[in-house]
Image (tube, rainbow, N blue to C red):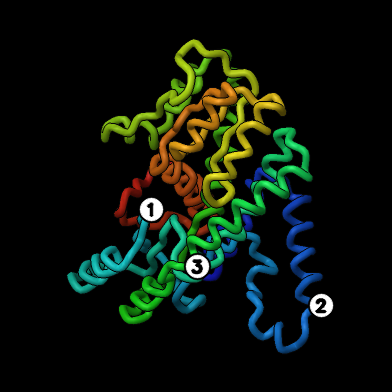
Amino acid sequence: MKLKDIQDIFVKEGINEDPRGLDIVEADLLKRKEEYDALSFKKKESYDIESLSNPYYDSRIIYGDPDIHVKIILVGIDIETQELLLAKSLMDSGIKIDLVIAHHPEGYACSTFHSVMNMQIDILNNQGVPINITEKIVSERIREVQKNIFSKNNERIYDATKLLKIPFMTAHSVADNHVASFLEKNITELKPVYLKEIVELLNRYSEYQHAITIGQAPFILCGNDFSRCGKVFVDMTGGTEGPLESFGKLAAAGVGTIVGMHLSSKAVKEAEKYHLNVILAGHISSDNLGLNLLFDKLENKAGKLEFIECSGFRRFRR
């Protein structure tokens, strides 16, 4: 399969699993098209054309000919220069690698990554938080993240892939959408009463079973085994951790339990303040689950591919 076809599949399947719903995704893309059409010719020259069809700024080809054929892929949760040098070393030793995929965004995908957080406006609204509130609190958080990204040297990985001539792409929100929808569907079907039932469900999946073996099992952060769940919010996509103000708004909207990948110490205090239960499924294990669900769909269309595991990625097929 060609690299550009892989990218197209990732975007299509990311949209299919987007927690906002297809109507909102299409409206977002239409809004971008209208903004682009209104620009002067000069400004259009520097516009990110891909964003007109790809709603996920953090998931894209960073370097490489879109027409190359791909069969063997090295995949890592985090890919930096050392992993690219590892790939080059493997290639020099005779191991063929057609493409490197990182989960976490790098290069241009990192520079524009904060824009993906706009997803959180509609995700929080779907949980019952009024849209006028979600727009304001998420916008403030986006500005905070944007300032942090602005100080980073985001071209390091692009330069390394270019110098080493290794095709490279990122698959962040397109994978995170999958883990969010997968867990939400299965938790909804389970209809758990107690938190321990959700943890037991997570532990059925290969990614979390592997996490147990390396000391990173899912666990209850706020609450206990027999704390009652109430309404469960699976918070697994939308770029990065949302605004602190969201916890109080979610509690007011009737959410009783949050199932997430990770949570900062400040966010934990906010969750406790509003008596929210919190289950941490695990960061890298949840990233793995999202990637594996995405890769299963890729292989359904491309046939079996060879995956070389590195940087915390483990391939589990379903």
**Whole-percent x and y of residue 279?**
48, 27
**Whole-percent x and y of residue 278?**
51, 27
Q: Residue furthest top?
A: 226
Q: Mark 1 falls on what kind of element? A: loop
Q: Is residue 54 above or below residue 195?
A: below
Q: Which residue: 44% across, 23% down? A: 220
- Closer to the camera in the image, 126 or 210: 126
- Mark 1 belongs to which amino acid? Ile
Indicate the quadrant where residue 82 lies.
Answer: bottom left
- Closer to the camera in the image, 222 or 52: 222
- Mark 2 belongs to which amino acid? Ala
Looking at the image, residue 137 sits to the left or right of residue 187; the answer is right
Mark toward the start of the polypeptide (1 vs 3) = 1
Of badges 2 and 1, the one in the foreground is 2
* Label pair 2/3, CB-CB below 8 angstroms: no
Residue behind mark 1: 77
Mark toward the start of the polypeptide (2 vs 3) = 2
Residue behind mark 3: 150
- Closer to the camera in the image, 197 or 182: 197
* Label pair 2/1, CB-CB below 8 angstroms: no
Q: Which residue: 63% across, 46% down? A: 17
Of badges 1 and 3, the one in the foreground is 3
- Mark 3 belongs to which amino acid? Phe
- Using the numbered discs, state the Cα–Cα distance from disc 2 to disc 1 in whole angstroms: 38 Å
Task: Determine crowd level at label 2: few under 14, some 14-19, many 20+ residues with C-alpha closer than 10 A.
Answer: few
- Using the numbered discs, state the Cα–Cα distance from disc 2 to disc 3 in whole angstroms: 27 Å
Q: Is residue 238 above or below residue 40?
A: above
